[in-house]
C-alpha cells in the first residue's frame, strides 16, 4: 500500500507546518541552525528532509557532504531546486526507511531525525541510523508531545489529515531504551513549547559502539 506521505503535496505540508497555530517549521529551522553550529559536522544526514527546511544554515566551509533522505521523490526534487546552487555536495536519496532495507549511503558525523519516529517503528529507525553513523557521531531526535492536544492540528489543510492515520506518539522511555540497545547514549535534552500547547522534545545522542 502506498505510504500516505506520497499523497501529501509539499506545499500543503509546509503550509500546515508554518501555520500560526502549529509553528513547527520555524522552530525546527531554528533547531537545525543551533545544532549545526554546535556540532559542526563534516557529513550530515537529514531523515525526512521534505523541502529542505533549515538547509540554508549549512556552512560549506565546515560541512563537506549533505545527504537528504525522503520517501517522497517530489519533495526531493523541490529541495534540489531550492538548494543545488547553495550546497555543492548535496545528495538527495529516495528511500523508505520503514522497508527495513539498510543501504550503505555514507557514514555521517550527524544524523538529523525530526518528527520521523512518529511515523516509522522505533527499532526500524535505529537500525537504519545505525548503518549510516560514525562511531562518536551525534544523533538529534525531535519528537512531538501533545500535552492533551489532538495529534494533527486543524489548519484547514485537508491532505495533511491522512498523516494522522499512521502517526503515533513516542515516549521518552521507549526512545531511550531503543537507542541504548543500538549503542546510543543520551547526552542532552531540550523541550520547546509550540503555540497550540504541544511541544517538541529534542534529544541528543552519541554513538558509543
Image: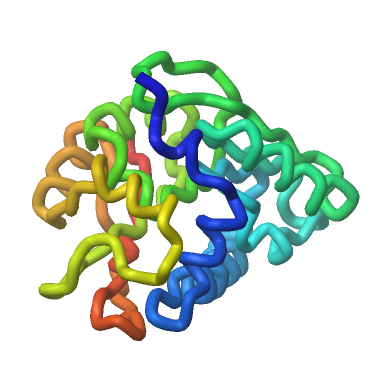
User: Viewed as shown, does residue 178 lie left or right of 67?
Assistant: left
Quarter where residue 90 is shown: top right
Q: Position of residue 101 (x, y in %)?
A: 41, 14
Residue at (44% x, 35% y) in the render: 135
All told, the count of numbered labels is 0
Which residue is more in the foreground, 108 or 148? 148
Q: What colour-coding does the image apply?
A: rainbow
Q: Position of residue 163 (x, y in %)?
A: 34, 47
Q: Position of residue 152 (x, y in %)?
A: 29, 61
Residue at (34% x, 53% y) in the render: 161
Quarter where residue 123 is shown: top left
Which residue is more in the foreground, 43 or 209? 43
Residue at (30% x, 81% y) in the render: 196
Quarter where residue 202 is shown: bottom left
User: Viewed as shown, does residue 176 lie left or right of 46?
Assistant: left
Quadrant the N terminus occupies: top left
Q: Report if residue 76 is visible in the image.
A: yes
Residue at (57% x, 47% y) in the render: 9
Q: Report if residue 38 is visible in the image.
A: no
Q: Position of residue 203 (x, y in %)?
A: 31, 60
Quadrant the C terminus occupies: top left
Which residue is more in the foreground, 140 or 186? 140
Rendered position, 1 above or below 125: above
User: Viewed as shown, does residue 171 lie left or right of 60?
Assistant: left
Rendered position, 91 above or below 201: above
Amino acid at each position: 500500500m502506498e505510504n500516505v506521505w506520497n499523497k501529501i503535496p509539499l506545499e500543503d505540508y509546509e503550509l500546515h507546518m508554518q501555520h500560526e497555530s502549529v509553528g513547527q517549521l520555524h522552530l525546527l529551522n531554528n533547531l537545525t541552525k543551533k545544532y549545526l553550529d554546535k556540532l559542526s559536522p563534516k557529513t550530515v544526514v537529514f531523515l525526512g528532509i521534505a523541502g529542505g527546511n533549515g538547509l540554508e544554515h549549512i556552512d560549506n566551509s565546515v560541512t563537506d557532504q549533505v545527504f537528504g533522505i525522503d520517501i517522497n521523490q517530489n519533495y526531493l526534487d523541490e529541495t534540489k531546486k531550492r538548494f543545488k546552487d547553495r550546497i555543492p555536495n548535496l545528495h538527495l536519496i529516495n528511500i523508505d526507511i520503514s522497508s527495513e532495507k539498510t543501504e550503505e549511503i555514507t557514514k555521517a558525523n550527524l544524523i538529523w531525525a525530526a518528527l520521523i519516529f512518529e511515523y516509522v517503528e522505533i527499532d526500524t529507525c535505529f537500525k537504519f541510523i545505525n548503518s549510516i553513523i560514525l562511531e562518536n557521531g551525534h544523533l538529534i531526535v525531535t519528537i512531538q508531545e501533545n500535552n492533551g492536544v489532538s495529534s494533527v492540528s486543524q489548519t484547514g489543510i485537508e491532505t495533511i489529515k491522512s498523516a494522522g492515520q499512521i502517526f503515533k506518539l513516542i515516549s521518552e522511555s521507549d526512545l531511550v531504551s531503543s537507542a541504548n540497545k543500538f549503542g546510543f547514549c543520551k547526552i542532552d535534552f531540550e523541550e520547546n513549547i509550540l503555540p497550540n500547547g504541544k511541544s517538541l522534545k529534542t534529544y541528543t545522542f552519541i554513538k558509543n559502539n
